[in-house]
Every structure is written in structure tokens, then in C-alpha cells.
Amino acid sequence: MCSYAVLRYWERRGFLRTALPSYDAFKKTFGRYVDLLGFPPNKLNDYLRDICKKDRLKVQHREGSIESLQAHLRNKIPVISLFDYNMYQRGQPARSTHATVLVGYTPENMLANDPFHGKKYPYEKNRFQEAWALRNNRYILITTKVTLNSFPTEP
């Protein structure tokens, strides 16, 4: 769900050469992979090669800090974060990894378009960091590939 939401974001900005299919059709394309956390980047990269203009998007799995998440968000790059949902909600660690699309932040909160809670759901930053650390501060980026050839040249 999160990967699809981020692809919709890039579609609205003109990075895809074809319209994304419905979410149900997207799920059928990837079968069992669509519901897995840590969606295999090679599967999504292969798909992006087919639908993107000039191979302009890439998938990266990363680890970082809250500052790295905020830097991506300041640059208008949505971030798919992976965290221990039970730890965030109840303060008890569990095997309950959750993915959400971070879309902004305030001094107190990380704002997420969350499959469970809806748009701009505020995750309290300190509790989020604690729950995120249990999943090794992992996140997924679907970003633009910028090269010197990406910019128009004058005749």
C-alpha cells in the first residue's frame, strides 16, 4: 500500500509515462510481494523501468536518523518508514512491524499518510523514534534519478 501511494505521488508530478493501474491491479502484478514489508527493490525497480519516463525513479532501502528522514521530507521526498507498531501504541516491543508513508513533520510529530489512520496522522516523535529503532531505523525511498542529462540543454 505504501509503495503504491508513493508511486501515485510521483505520477502526479509527471514522472510516469503511463497511468498507474488500480491498487487491485497493482497487487495482482506483484502477487505475494505487495503485502511484504521491505518490498524487494529489484521487483519494484523492474516495474519502474516499464512505467517511468527515461528510467527516472529508483528504489532504495536505507537506515538513518530522524534528521535524515526530515531532510528527505524537506526536499519533498516521501519516506516509507518501518517501525514496531506495538511499541509505538502500547510501549511493549513485539513482532508487529508496520510501514507508513511519512509526508511531513513538526517539532513534536512525524506526519504520516498511514494505511491504518489516514492522512497526516501525527506520530509523536520521541515514541516514533523508539519504535523505529527496534526496526534498525530502516526506511524505503522511491526517488528521482537526477543526472546531468536530466536537465534541458540550450541549442
Image (tube, rainbow, N blue to C red):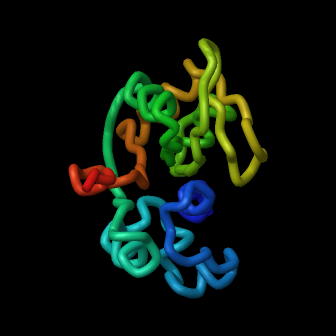
Foreground of the two, 119 or 89: 119
Foreground of the two, 88 or 59: 59
Note whether 115 is above or below 132 in the view shown.
Answer: below
Note whether 26 is above or below 134 in the view shown.
Answer: below
Foreground of the two, 86 or 10: 10
Image check: 148 left or right of 81? left
Q: Residue furthest left?
A: 148
Q: Residue furthest right?
A: 118
Quadrant holding the C terminus: bottom left
Quadrant holding the N terminus: bottom right
Note whether 147 is above or below 132 in the view shown.
Answer: below
Residue 61, percent from left and from top: 33, 52
Image check: 126 left or right of 137? right
Image check: 33 left or right of 154? right
Q: Residue at x 51, y 80 (%)?
A: 32
Foreground of the two, 112 or 73: 73
Note whether 123 is above or below 98 in the view shown.
Answer: above
Q: Where is residue 14, by image quadrant? A: bottom right
